[in-house]
Image: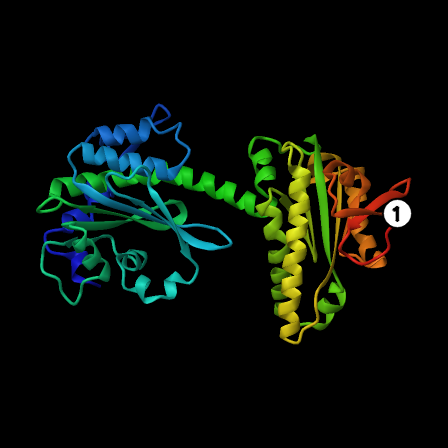
Amino acid sequence: MRSDSTKPGSADIDDSRNLGQEDDVGSRSESQSGGQVQADHPGYWPRRRTSVLDWLINETRQERFLDNIFGEFCLRLRADGIPVARAVMQLRILHPQWFGTRVLWRPGMKATELQNIEYGITETDTYRNSPVAALHSGSRQVRKRLEEPSSDQDYPIYAEMRREGLTDYVAWPLDYTLGKRYVVSFAADRRGGFNEDELALLADILPALSLVTEVRFKNRLARRLLETYVGPHASEQILSGLITRGGGVTITAVIMICDLRGFTAISELWPRDDVISLLNEYFEVVSAPLERHGGEILKFIGDGLFAIFPLDRSTACADALMAVSDARQGMAALNERRSGRGLEPFGYGIGVNVGDVMYGNIGTSSRLDFTVIGPAVNAARLEGLTKHLGRTVLFSGGFAAMVEDRSLRRLGSYPLRGLGEPLEVFGFTDEEGPGV
């Protein structure tokens, strides 16, 4: 362990998050009197009252975002004379793309800066040779007086902070419930750095900072996980209280179903990891334009996906058409790359319809699925006709009438399973196949 983590004279700071516990733990006597538990001491925290602590506990209830609280917290520390000139909070998040996030504050910033941390960071020398790694490994504190001469034992980040004119640095674990350990650090710009009283005050506030930020952290975590698995619009409905079986609303939306052709044979013949890689590559190409143009993917079903474009936006039909056009271009480029590698091109089919659907919860009393149901969904299954008609994309007559785009032409009327009457079907004019 580096010498600055256990620097002489800083042991009182190293244990300051447990100030008073040495005298109280093990000596606390409790007696049962009149059905109530009585203790023989007044408690040990906080060590002293401060305006920052009062604000953190009592005045942050209406603030939803962790980074806003952290920024205001640092501003208040500086206003109280503590020379905080750089503060960082590093958190591990559950996200399909990012390993963690870094919240940075400096004086003069209009807002804190959020930086996403990529997966694999813990395998790099940058991480291994950092105060964060030391704290994750069990250190209680990392402290460095930056005005002192540098040494071979210094972490590389110290040189960066010296160039910024910072004079002192301290980092502590930010302990959340169930053993989750993150990191918070502070750097000073005053000559001489932090004094011992200021360090004790910062350490004393950490339990409150942990509690207040963990609530926001877990709220955002729940929201992010819901967005990842059911989409942003559905997650908002669920978090707003639409959680009872049968509960839902009727909405008008463009419904889109996309299906990969020949997947059954591929899944039976290819190794599992290759099949997953194939699906991810295909979904990435098709999904990105849908989300870019305002669509919401409700679910992936094997080799297919189910998406909607709610008509609460006047441009929803045009947006859906652009998303499909971009997806076609993306699939053409993907198939060209596959051909260059000697692989078979992907075959696929997309069906698009518009209509009223019930948007809400179906399932059992203990397991629900947030989805859309209704005749308009059945009509969107015209993607099953694409192979028969030699097309990649088919649109219902209802959608074509609403979008009024010359890139579409009528192909005829065709029966669909689940619908009483044949459905009028349209396709792109630039695609080969029957047309009328």
**Callout 1 environment at 10 Å: few (<14), some (14 to 19), or many (20+)?**
some
Residue at 70% across, 71% down: 344
Q: Is residue 55 above or below residue 151?
A: above
**Residue 234 versus residue 313: which sits nearer the camera?**
313
The answer to whether residue 21 is visible is: no
Left or right of residue 2, residue 37 in this image? right
Residue at 74% across, 47% down: 407
Left or right of residue 34, residue 299 in this image? right
Residue at 34% across, 35% down: 69
On the image, the x and y values in percent for residue 74 come to 25, 38
Q: Residue furthest bottom?
A: 342
Q: Residue furthest top?
A: 34
Left or right of residue 259, residue 104 in this image? left
On the image, the x and y values in percent for residue 59 come to 33, 26
On the image, the x and y values in percent for residue 207 come to 29, 40
* Type of amino acid at the residue the image marks with label 1: Gly
Element under disc 1: strand
On the image, the x and y values in percent for residue 240 come to 56, 31
Left or right of residue 157, residue 242 in this image? right
The answer to whether residue 290 is visible is: yes
Residue for badge 1:
412
Image quadrant assignment for residue 50: top left
Residue at 35% across, 29% down: 60
